Amino acid sequence: MAAPIRHIKLLASLTDEELLSEFKKNFNQQMLAQLYLRYTDLVYGVCMKYFKNAETSKDTVMNIYQELLTKLQTNEVQNFKSWLYVVVKNHCLMQLRKEKKNITVEFTPAVMQSEDFTHLDDVLEKENELKKLEFCIERLPADQKQSIRLFYLKNKCYNEIVDTTGYDWSKVRSLIQNGRRNLKICMEKNGRTINPY
């Protein structure tokens, strides 16, 4: 156990520039994960500013990481924090623009989480969906189930899940992505597609 802790401390002591350089040299995702971890609160804050929605912002934090894997291969970055801020801001603006263009709104009250969810019929329908969702969560592998519950049901951020589970940041991200995909498959098999974001 001492060796991984020493390794984590060593990574934490590297500057942004050193982590970025190591990532670009060997495409070592652990370097990028460590670097991104330093700024997830910043990324989340920028997303909240534009989307005003916690779930959309959490998903965007994940999506931005994926985007960085590609962008960093072609971009020369002098100051990672400033560059990341611009990337996140542009990503959010693009998403908002896309949503304005696609005015085809699919509205299924039983599935969507909505604050004006006031009709009794809809409440019963939603309860039924939640039972299905719970049924599917229970069938996930233990590590995915734990991460999904912490992220979506307890509203924990990645850093808190890392602290709670002891998994590294990349593993937590992977567990949540895979868990979400497995949930979608399970919900479709059980008669309705649900968006578990």
Image (cartoon, rainbow, N blue to C red):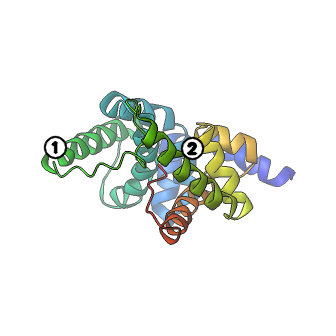
Instruction: State which tag comes first along the sequence, 2 or 1.
Output: 1
Q: Is residue 72 above or below residue 46?
A: below
Q: State the residue lying farthest toward the bottom.
A: 189
- Three-letter amino acid code of the residue under disc 2: Tyr
Q: Does the rendering let one see residue 8? A: yes
Q: Amino acid at mark 1?
A: Lys
Residue pictured at 86% horizontal, 50% vertical: 2
Q: Which mark is residue 100?
A: 1
Q: Residue at x 51, y 72 (%)?
A: 189
In this figure, which residue is indicated by the disc labeled 2? 152
> Does 145 appear above or below 55?
below
The x and y percentages for residue 30 are 59, 56
Q: Residue at x 64, y 59 (%)?
A: 135
Residue furthest front in the image: 121
Measured Cα–Cα span from mark 2 to mark 1: 26 Å
Query: Total of numbered circles in the picture?
Result: 2
Q: Position of residue 193 (x, y in %)?
A: 43, 62
Residue at 44% of width from left, 47% of height from top? Answer: 59
User: Could you say where residue 61 lies in the image, as x and y percent from the top left?
Assistant: 44, 44
Q: Quadrant of residue 137?
A: bottom right
User: Is label 1 in a helix, a strand or a loop?
Assistant: helix
